[in-house]
Amino acid sequence: MRFLIISFSCLLLASMAHVAHADGMVVDKVYHPYVMPFEREVEWRLVSRQTDQGNVLAQRAGFGGAINDTMSLEGYMVGERDDNGDFGLASYEVELRWQLVEQGRLWADWGALFELEKQHTIDAYEATTGFLWEKEFGRTSLTMNAFLVYEWGADIDSEWETEFRLQYRYRYRAEFQPSIEVYSGEDFFGVGPGFIGLHRFSPKHQLKWEAGFISELSQSGKDHSFRLALEFEF
Amino acid sequence: MNKWIFAFTMMLCLPSWLAYGKEYTLILKDHLFYPAEIKVPANKKLRLLIDNQDNTPEEFDSFDLNREKVLYPGRTSVIYIGPLSPGRYDFFGEFSPNTARGTVIATEDKNADN
């Protein structure tokens, strides 16, 4: 019952945030506000968005790790396939995640995210900053991200945007934690089921996985996104 | 709508001093936790102080408690847990999972460890 009440509250909150605006693919990943010292990881993410106009596929590969007790730095290369079926390198990105408070110390946990992205073939940049937030409710966890984005460059119009992401998961078992996810941006308000999990191979090696199927709700046309993320930590 | 956003923001900012609980101390020595079982009161926020007396780092890991924390050698680390429903919550040391194991037992009776 509590799961349903919180889920409904999350949807209500996300709909209030629907004044948010952002271009491109809003569905990506909901970030958690935690950093583990000593941890390094390689990461691969995929988002496939199917609309009436066709399919857009984005993949990113990243490598990074903790640089101190509370910060992690990760670099990505992003590839995209457009409507013509051409897949190629689209952009580069560097991302800094900062855990602001000790987990469980405050009523909720806070972190911050800073990203800088450069498009590969055109003179276009994107800087993102925002808060990462997480709160436990018994065996469930509510995670929210709120981002402010600024785009600039000679080949694009400069603009400010906002994005909102939400994940409410039930920590059923380490390997399978079902969730509800919400993504909000310009002309996009998507909701759908997902799950995350992890498997530990040895004391210092583990694989995390995340997947979600998000349906856009504010438009009448077809707009479904499937996302998958794999992280190998060592 | 602005007042709802303001109220929600204030709710997120509520600090922990509104509901702080007791401290419980554990020792990690020779890759073993002492005591291996600790009773705590249910439905309270608590602090686990873990004194790592080994010469190597350890990583406290508990899916049940939803916590991961690096325990540096020769230092005392603080892990904030709870409020917990009555029950057993297993934890282990990720670098010595066969030996460094323990359980937090949350109970509503008054026999919780001091």
Image (spheres, grey):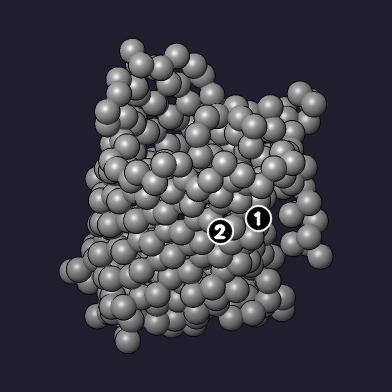
Q: Are the residues tagged 1 and 2 within 8 Å (C-beta)?
A: yes
Residue, x 34% and y 22% (percent of image)? A124
Q: Position of residue A140 (x, y in %)?
A: 64, 63
The type of residue carrying mark 1 is Gly
Query: Quick check: B71 left or right of B61?
Result: left
Q: Residue furthest front?
A: A84
* Quarter of the rendering containing residue A136: bottom right
Left or right: A95 in relation to A106: left
Residue located 43% across and 21% down the image:
A151
Residue at the image point whose x is 51% and y is 65% from the top: A196
Q: Residue A40, can we see it?
A: yes
Q: How many marks?
A: 2
The extreme bottom residue here reads B98
Q: Position of residue A208 (x, y in %)?
A: 40, 65
Q: Amino acid at mark 2?
A: Gly
Q: Observer-nearest residue: B65 or A217? A: A217
Which residue in the structure is indicated by mark 1? A192
Task: Estimate how packed mark 2 is, as few (under 14), some (14 to 19) or many (20 or more) residues with alpha carbons within 10 Å.
Answer: many
Instruction: Write down the residue under mark 2.
Output: A212
Q: Secondary structure at mark 2?
A: strand
- Residue A187 rendering spot, x and y as whole percentages: 64, 32
Q: Where's residue B112, x and y in %?
A: 62, 76
A134 and B74: which is toward the camera: A134
* Residue drawn at 74 percent across, 62 percent down: A3
Q: Is residue A66 visible?
A: no
